[in-house]
Image (cartoon, helix red, strand yellow):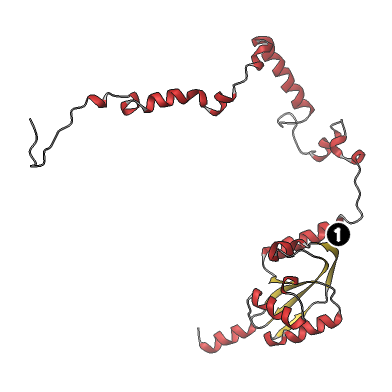
Amino acid sequence: MELKQYISEAFSKEYGFRVKIAGDCDTNTLDMLEKCLQKYNLVSATPWKRTPIEENPQEFVRAKGATFTSEVCSSDIVLKYPVNERILEVWLAVNLGLNHERVLVYGVKEPRRIESEIAEIRHEEDKDRYVSEEDAELNKEEQAHYENENVDVDYKEAFFGEEFNKKFLEELQKIKDEKGADYFRAYPSKDELMGDDLKQMHDDLMGQPNMGRGAESTKQVDTISQHGSRSR
């Protein structure tokens, strides 16, 4: 690749970041943000997107270990000049007069962006949502809600549903009739489950030559003296 082409491609690249500030941000704050980002050839910055005031915003707690009550304002920015996210955090905090723990920056391609957007959607959908015990699906005794959620399931082959439960109970009763009710009471003890009852057998086997497969203790071993000749 020619140097001219390399330089041309380098200048054509753009770098996207999401800036999050835990605090009250207005148009003046956005103007200050744009001015201090001119150093990195700012292409664009979206208007602030706000979240309601909350205690200990999750992202700031995990990233900075910070604990405070605040709203969170975010803006997606595009720069022509590459910069490390942590350096950009410090630069913005100093120029905006904010505590470093209240500024968070990460690349828009990072998984944290997707996670953040999912959390925002969930938070918005759960707003003013109240659920009572009477509305809970699992509180219903009938199986109709399960069947509605599994309309494509063949209950004759599935391992759940009324038909499977009926078949299972019939098979269980059949075993009881054949082997007696006490058959299901003979559960293994804790020692049997953990293998402690086999410890003595293990010790006996490990204490024997070749784990009991052969009498290696009787095998003749040559004795070689220091002068190198075998003893006869």
145 sits left or right of 34 in the view? right
Rendered location of residue 132, percent (x, y): 91, 43
User: Which residue is more in the foreground, 59 or 47?
Assistant: 59
Q: The C terminus appears in which quarter of the rendering?
A: top left
What's the residue type where badge 1 is placed? Glu
Residue for badge 1: 124
Front-most of residues 101 and 109: 101
Q: Position of residue 10 (x, y in %)?
A: 59, 83
Q: Is residue 27 left or right of residue 43?
A: right
Q: Quadrant of residue 110?
A: bottom right
Q: Quadrant of residue 37?
A: bottom right
Task: Report the number of discs.
Answer: 1
Residue at 73 percent across and 28 percent down: it is: 156
User: Which residue appears at 71% of the width and 31% of the height?
Assistant: 159
Disc 1 secondary structure class: helix
Is residue 149 shown above or below 7?
above
Q: Residue at x 75, y 36 (%)?
A: 153
Q: Which residue is the extreme one toward the front?
A: 226
Q: Position of residue 231 (x, y in %)?
A: 8, 33
**Residue 125 image position (x, y, % from top left):** 86, 56
Could you say which quadrant of the image residue 105 lies in?
bottom right
